[in-house]
Image (cartoon, rainbow, N blue to C red):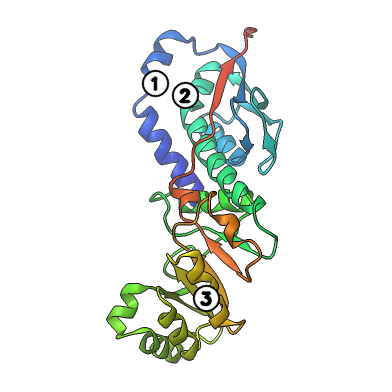
C-alpha cells in the first residue's frame, strides 16, 4: 500500500468507523444518483487524484469525472467534479474527499499567491512544518501552487540549524565537521542568525546560507557580505505584507512555513442532483 492509500484508509476509518449510521438507515442500498462538487471561493485546485482514490476505495463502481485539473484556477460556483453511482457510496466519501480537496487547494492557493509576487529566479520553498502524516500530500500541493520543495525530511538534505551549531561549538566548527563527513554530492546549508554568523559561514565554505529571522536591512547587508559566494535563502517572518521588500534582491530561495501550517482551506461542497435514478 503506497503512502496516499494509507492516508486515505486512515481518514476513512476515522470518519466512517463501523458504518455511516444515518446513511445506512435512510438510503436504500440500490438507490443511484449523480452528485457534483462545487467550489465556493476562488483558488488553485489541488487534490483531484486523492479525491478519486477516496471514492474508489469506498466503491470501485462509482463513475468519476473531474471537470478541472490540479493547478487550474477555480472560481465561486464552478463545478469541478461529477460522481455517479450508489448514493450511499457517494455520501460516505463526501466529507473525507472535501476535507482533502479543501486543505490541499488551500496550500496550493497560498503558495501561488507568493509565487506571483516574485520573479521566476526566486524560488518559494516549503518547510518541514507540516501536519504529521500529511507531508507527502502537502508538499505536492506546494508544487501544484508553483513552489518548490525543501527537503522532505531529515534524511535527504543537510541543513545545520541553531541547535546543531550550539552542540558543535559554533558555525565554523559545525561546518568543518559536516564537510569532513558529508557525502560529496550533498550541498551543505547552514542557518545564520547574525551578520557574524554569515561571515563565519562563508569562511567555513557553506554552499547555502539561510538568513534566519533577519530584518530587511540585515538581509541586505548579509547579501553584500555574501556577494555571490554562496546561495542565499531567506526564512522567518515572511508574509504577503513584507515579501515585496525582497523583490530585486539577489536571493535564491525564500522558505515559508505558513504555506503549509497556516494556509486557509478553500471551501467546497458536494450536492446530489434532483434527478435520482
> Could you say which disc has been placed on residue 20 in the image?
1
Task: Give x and y (percent) for residue 144.
Answer: 63, 49
Residue 130 horizontal/vertical position (percent): 43, 52
Dot 3 alpha-carbon crowd within 10 angstroms: few under 14, some 14 to 19, many 20 or more: few
Determine the CA span between mark 1 and mark 2: 7 Å
Q: Residue at x 50, y 86 (%)?
A: 202
Residue 89 shows in this picture: yes
- Under tag 3, what secondary structure? helix
- Dot 2: element: helix
Q: Residue at x 38, y 34 (%)?
A: 13
Q: Which residue is mark 3?
A: 221
229 and 190: which one is in front?
229
Mark 1 → mark 3, Cα distance in angstroms? 60 Å
Q: Residues within 10 Å of mark 1 (few under 14, many from 20)?
A: some
Sequence-earlier tag: 2 or 3: 2
Q: Secondary structure at mark 1?
A: loop
Q: Is residue 144 above or below residue 220?
A: above
Q: Nearer the viewer, residue 13 or 264?
A: 264
- Do the residues bearing badges 1 and 2 touch, measured as CB atoms within 8 Å? yes
Q: How many marks?
A: 3
Residue 49: x %, y % from top left = 61, 41
Amino acid at each position: 500500500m503506497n503512502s496516499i492509500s494509507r492516508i486515505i484508509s486512515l481518514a476513512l476509518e476515522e470518519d466512517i468507523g463501523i458504518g455511516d449510521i444515518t446513511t445506512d438507515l435512510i438510503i436504500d442500498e440500490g438507490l443511484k444518483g449523480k452528485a457534483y462538487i462545487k467550489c465556493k471561493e476562488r483558488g488553485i485546485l489541488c487534490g483531484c487524484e486523492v479525491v478519486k482514490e477516496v471514492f474508489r476505495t469506498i466503491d470501485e463502481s462509482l463513475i468519476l469525472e473531474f471537470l478541472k485539473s490540479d493547478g487550474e484556477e477555480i472560481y465561486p460556483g464552478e463545478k469541478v467534479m461529477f460522481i455517479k453511482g450508489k448514493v450511499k457510496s457517494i455520501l460516505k466519501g463526501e466529507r473525507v474527499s472535501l476535507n482533502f480537496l479543501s486543505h490541499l487547494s488551500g496550500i496550493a492557493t497560498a503558495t501561488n499567491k507568493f509565487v506571483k509576487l516574485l520573479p521566476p529566479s526566486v524560488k518559494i520553498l516549503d518547510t518541514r512544518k507540516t501536519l504529521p502524516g500529511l507531508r507527502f500530500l502537502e508538499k505536492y500541493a506546494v508544487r501544484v501552487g508553483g513552489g518548490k520543495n525543501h527537503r522532505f525530511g531529515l534524511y535527504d538534505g543537510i541543513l545545520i540549524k541553531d541547535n546543531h551549531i550550539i552542540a558543535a561549538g559554533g558555525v565554523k566548527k559545525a561546518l568543518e565537521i559536516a564537510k569532513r563527513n558529508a557525502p560529496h554530492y550533498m550541498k551543505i546549508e547552514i542557518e545564520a542568525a547574525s551578520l557574524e554568523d554569515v561571515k563565519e559561514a562563508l569562511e567555513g565554505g557553506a554552499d547555502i546560507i539561510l538568513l534566519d529571522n533577519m530584518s530587511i536591512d540585515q538581509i541586505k547587508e548579509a547579501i553584500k557580505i555574501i556577494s555571490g559566494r554562496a546561495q542565499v535563502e531567506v526564512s522567518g517572518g515572511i508574509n504577503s505584507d513584507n515579501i515585496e521588500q525582497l523583490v530585486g534582491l539577489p536571493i535564491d530561495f525564500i522558505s515559508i512555513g505558513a504555506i503549509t501550517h497556516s494556509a486557509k482551506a478553500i471551501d467546497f461542497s458536494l450536492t446530489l442532483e434532483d434527478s435520482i435514478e
